[in-house]
């Protein structure tokens, strides 16, 4: 059993909608969902180990993060839940589903993938770890920022870029290192897709430069009954880039299950 509970932020009442952030972000990436979906759900935004209010830095794995989230949700009476995650958060969703599917009502996967890192991707993680050690969080933000947003987002919504930079630069280099190791060493969930027995929505930014559409399509084919939604005008961060469209897509899907 985890020795300490993760921190979280929440808004609203009703069915728990639990959201797990990507790398290297924190629960602030879900601000528009905490505000925009709270009329219909009890929205719970998780802070993974070392992030936001879940400081200080400490090692974790994708699997241990899923177990810690389950312990937290049990402690706050938020099971069964709808579980959603973006990118790294999606990896956590797969591990949660592998362990606690009976405590899930549905799943929302945004701009993520189910396969493990290959040799090249692992080496890239190792290089990023060195950058974090030697040059800090700002250097990691410099590397990641150009790939995160749709080309028009910085011009049309400059506040999104500014907020992303603020979040990324606030993460400690040690937390970045721990996270990169967790991502590098995560297990492959491809073979488990067919065992996911809850309604699943896969959301993709139309201009995501990190996760190809073909990856989302393969997950849709692998998960029984999964639906796929494309968010226009978004890159890798639809919840921040196109929050109204993202929220409407998620709300419509979840309300259709009632």
Image: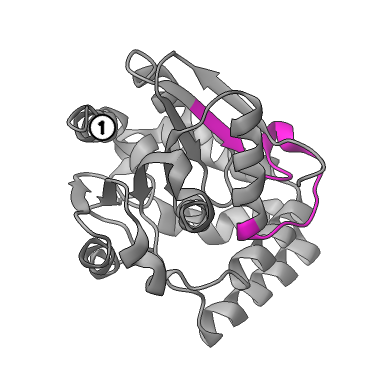
Nearer-the-camera pick, 140 or 52: 52
Nearer-the-camera pick, 132 or 82: 82
Please report the residue visible at 21 percent of the width from the left and 65 percent of the height from the top.
217
From where the camera sits, is residue 192 visible?
yes
Nearer-the-camera pick, 227 or 138: 227
Q: Residue 18 placed where, x, y %?
A: 47, 34
From where the camera sits, is residue 162 visible?
no
Mark 1 Cα within 10 Å, few/some/many (few <14, many 20+)? many
- Place residue 56 in its image quadrant: top right
Q: How many marks?
A: 1
Q: Is residue 74 left or right of residue 29?
A: right
| On screen, residue 134 above or below 254 | below
Q: Is residue 55 left or right of residue 12?
A: right
- Place residue 143 in its image quadrant: bottom right
Q: Quadrant of the C terminus?
A: top left
* Label 1 SS: helix
Q: Residue 49 placed where, x, y %?
A: 71, 45
Q: Is residue 42 left or right of residue 130?
A: left
**Residue highlighted by disc 1:** 254
Magenta stretch: includes residue 124:
no
Magenta stretch: includes residue 61:
yes
Q: Residue 57 placed where, x, y %?
A: 80, 48
Residue pushed farthest front? Answer: 102
Q: Residue 228 placed where, x, y %?
A: 20, 52
Q: Which residues are magenta?
A: 44-63
Please report the residue visible at 57 percent of the width from the left and 56 percent of the height from the top.
142
Please report the residue visible at 29 percent of the width from the left and 48 percent of the height from the top.
200
Q: Is residue 258 left or right of residue 137?
A: left
């Amino acid at each position: 059993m985890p020795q300490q509970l993760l921190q979280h932020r929440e808004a609203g009442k009703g069915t728990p909608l639990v959201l797990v952030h990507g790398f290297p972000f924190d629960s602030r990436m879900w601000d528009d969902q905490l505000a925009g979906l709270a009329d219909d759900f009890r929205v719970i935004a998780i802070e993974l180990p070392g992030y936001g209010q879940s400081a200080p830095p400490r090692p974790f794995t994708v699997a241990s993060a899923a177990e810690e989230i389950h312990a937290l949700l049990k402690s706050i009476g938020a099971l069964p839940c709808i579980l959603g995650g973006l990118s790294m958060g999606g990896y956590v969703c797969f591990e949660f589903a592998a362990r606690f599917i009976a405590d899930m009502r549905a799943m929302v996967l945004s701009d993520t993938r189910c396969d493990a890192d290959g040799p090249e991707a692992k080496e890239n993680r190792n290089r990023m770890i060195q950058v974090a050690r030697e040059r800090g969080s700002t250097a990691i933000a410099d590397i990641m920022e150009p790939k995160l947003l749709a080309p028009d987002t910085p011009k049309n919504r400059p506040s999104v870029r500014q907020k992303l930079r603020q979040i990324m630069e606030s993460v400690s280099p040690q937390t970045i290192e721990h996270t990169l190791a967790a991502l590098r060493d995560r297990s492959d969930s491809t073979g488990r897709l067919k065992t996911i027995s809850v309604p699943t929505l896969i959301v993709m930014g139309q201009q995501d430069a990190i996760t190809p559409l073909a990856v989302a399509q393969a997950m849709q084919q692998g998960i029984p009954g999964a639906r796929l939604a494309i968010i226009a005008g978004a890159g890798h961060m639809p919840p921040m880039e196109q929050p109204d469209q993202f929220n409407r897509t998620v709300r419509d899907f979840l309300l259709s299950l009632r």
